Each structure stands twice: as C-alpha cells, then as structure tokens.
Image (cartoon, grey):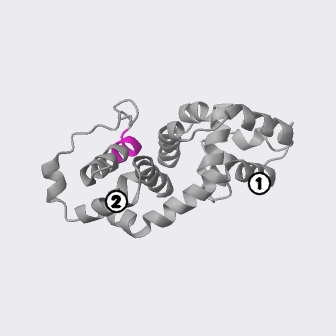
Amino acid sequence: MMTPFDCYKTYVALKNHFTKDSFDYHKYCGKTRATLNSFYKRKDRYWFEKISRQKSDDEVRDFFVSNFISCEDPQTLWIGEIIRNGNTNYQSWQKRIQSITYIFKEEVGQNFTRDNFDGMFKIEENRHPKIVKLYLSNKISIETLLILDKILGFSRHFNNKLDDPIWQLISLRLKKYNPFLNIDIFKFKKLLKEMIL
C-alpha cells in the first residue's frame, strides 16, 4: 500500500523525469531528494493522502504520467491543475491506451497516404514538418507520434535540423514518455506497412 509520502515522492520523481533532460525515473527507480519534512510543509498534502488511498502504486504512477503528457508544458504544470483536471486526463489517457491499436489505425488512415507519407517528415526552411503540425493541431495523438517515431526514428533527424523551442518540448516529451508506452512495436510496424505500402 502506497503511503501519502510515497505518492508525493512519485509525483516529484515524475515531474523531474518529464522536465529535466538528465533525470531518468527508471534509472533512479523513482528516487528523489524529497523529504518527509518538505512533504509535511505542503498545504496540499491532504490530496496526496487521498490519491494514495484511492489508487494502487502502478495507478499512481500512471495517473501522474498521464497528466504530465497531457499538459502543454510539464515545467509549468501546477499541482492545482492536477488536482482539478487530473482524473479527467487520467481517464482520457486510459481510454487511449486501451484503444491504442484502433486509434493508431484511425489517425494514420485519416492523415497518411502512400503518396504523402515521405513528405510528412520533410523539413523545409527550418519549418515544422507536417507530422509535427498534425500533432500540434490534435489530428494525431502523442501515442501515434511516439509509435511512428519508434518505428521510423525521425526524432533524431528533427533534433539535428530543428532549432525550435516547440520541437524541443515535443522531442523531450517523446523521449520521456517512451519507456512508459509498452507496445508490441512489430505489430505496429506490420500495421503501418499494410496501410502505407
């Protein structure tokens, strides 16, 4: 059973993971320098107590992950926003994960064709490629973007070519979300080939 302090430490570790390039939640096994003293000084500690009672260890982790990937900028995500919108973000994320194959097929089917596929990843004059614009306009989800990156590895190329704060934020989000998205990449590769080739 997770204690309220453990819940708080999970929050701090995941906030560090999603906002600091050098911090890796998995590498450090979720450990942080958070102290019991700092926890008891927080006015919102009752909320961590409530979450720890309602959710299992894995659910607490997934709850915070879903909120960090749903916000515009994890760096500015305030705990009050998570308290207010956290469950909505978590439920929306759960639905996407449960329907990930369907969503991937729908989003790829609606936005990609054999003819336009390569062009989706072209960078012209340091402007965002079409795939990034699709993500920014909510036409594809972060999961579809990440699955395509797992298959094609386009983010490395974008990182070298795009000197842009919006892409840097997306790139960091992809890198940090990657270890939490457990999928059968071969299944998705096969699906993509069937749809595009």
Q: Residue at x 61, y 42 (%)?
A: 146
Q: Who is closer to the viewer here, 33 or 151?
A: 33
Q: Residue furthest bottom?
A: 84
Mark 2 or mark 1, which is nearer to you? 2
Secondary structure beneath label 2: helix
Q: Magenta region, mostly helix, strand or loop?
A: helix
Q: Quadrant of residue 118?
A: top right
Q: Please name the residue that numbered disc 1 is placed on.
A: 106
Left or right of 22? Residue 164 is right
Quadrant location, the C terminus: top right
Q: Residue at x 32, y 49 (%)?
A: 2
On screen, 69 above or below 30?
below
The range drawn in magenta is 15-20
Badge 1, how many Cα within 10 Å: few under 14, some, many 20+? few
On screen, 150 above or below 79?
above
Q: Residue at x 23, y 61 (%)?
A: 45
Left or right of 3? Residue 93 is right
Amino acid type, mark 1: Glu
Q: Where residue 124 sits in the image (x, y, percent)? A: 67, 41
Q: Where residue 8 sits in the image (x, y, percent)? A: 28, 52
Left or right of 3? Residue 177 is right
Q: Who is closer to the viewer here, 138 or 24?
A: 24
Q: Where residue 160 sits in the image (x, y, percent)? A: 55, 31
Left or right of 189? Residue 35 is left
How far apart in space, not on screen, are marks 2 and 1 (Cα)?
37 Å
Q: Earlier in the sequence, mark 2 or mark 1?
A: 2
Q: Please name the residue that numbered disc 2 is placed on.
A: 53
Amino acid type, mark 2: Arg
